[in-house]
Image (cartoon, grey):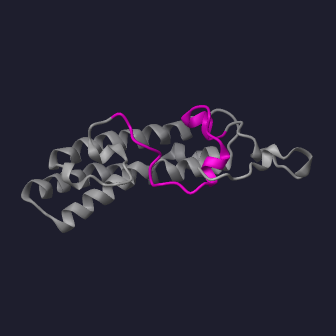
Amino acid sequence: MPDIPDPSKQGDANPAQSPRDSDEGGLSDLWGPGLDKRELLAPKPALRGPLPSTNPLVQGNSRIPFDQIKAADVEAAVRELTGDAQAKLDAIINLKGPRTFENTMLAFDMCTDRLEYASRIIKLIQATTPSPEFSEAYKSAQGPLAKFYSSMGSSEGLWKAFTEY
């Protein structure tokens, strides 16, 4: 990670420091301790790193393992990644404490990163090397993806979270 200065560590050099510069109620509340704002500002790949899954669509490698992706991986990846994104949305909705840019807007922006990454790979494979099996897997994934994304737009809890921010 590049060395990005942390303005909250500059003491008196930054007298106009805002309460939003602390992580109280920030992303670490949603995704666990240890998230540092410098990580948020640093250039990063689409994903935060590999997960303990054998599904190549879920692992989040910077090199896409096209030779390992099978039609059977599509349904499982969509199910796992929509579940992960929904859990992150639920954490935003159910957040206790003050809302900040980091724990509401940025968290919302990041909650579907992994799902979108896998969806782009699935779409690319379908468009460039279609097979009957992969075409069927692609078609079967469209319903759950559409349902998930449309539920975000009609979520009263998410709307409330945004208006509280």
Q: Is residue 27 magenta?
A: yes
Find the magenta span and give its range.
Answer: 26-52
- Is residue 15 shown to the viewer in this render? no
Query: Is 160 located above or below residue 51 in the figure?
Result: below
- Is residue 158 shown to the viewer in this render? yes
Most foreground residue, 133 or 13: 13
Most foreground residue, 63 or 90: 63
Query: Is 132 located above or below residue 83 in the figure?
Result: below
Q: Position of residue 161 (x, y in %)?
A: 60, 45
Say left or right for 32 vs 141.
right
Say left or right for 113 vs 54.
right
Q: Residue at x 15, y 64 (%)?
A: 129
The residue most toward the left is 132
**Occupied quadrant, residue 50:** top left
Q: Residue at x 29, y 48 (%)?
A: 57
Say left or right for 26 vs 50.
right
Q: Residue at x 63, y 54 (%)?
A: 41
Magenta region's main secondary structure?
A: loop
Q: Is residue 126 magenta?
A: no
Query: Is 6 located above or below residue 54 in the figure?
Result: below
Q: Position of residue 45 (x, y in %)?
A: 47, 54
Q: Position of residue 153 (x, y in %)?
A: 45, 54
Say left or right for 95 vs 46.
right
Q: Position of residue 48 (x, y in %)?
A: 47, 45
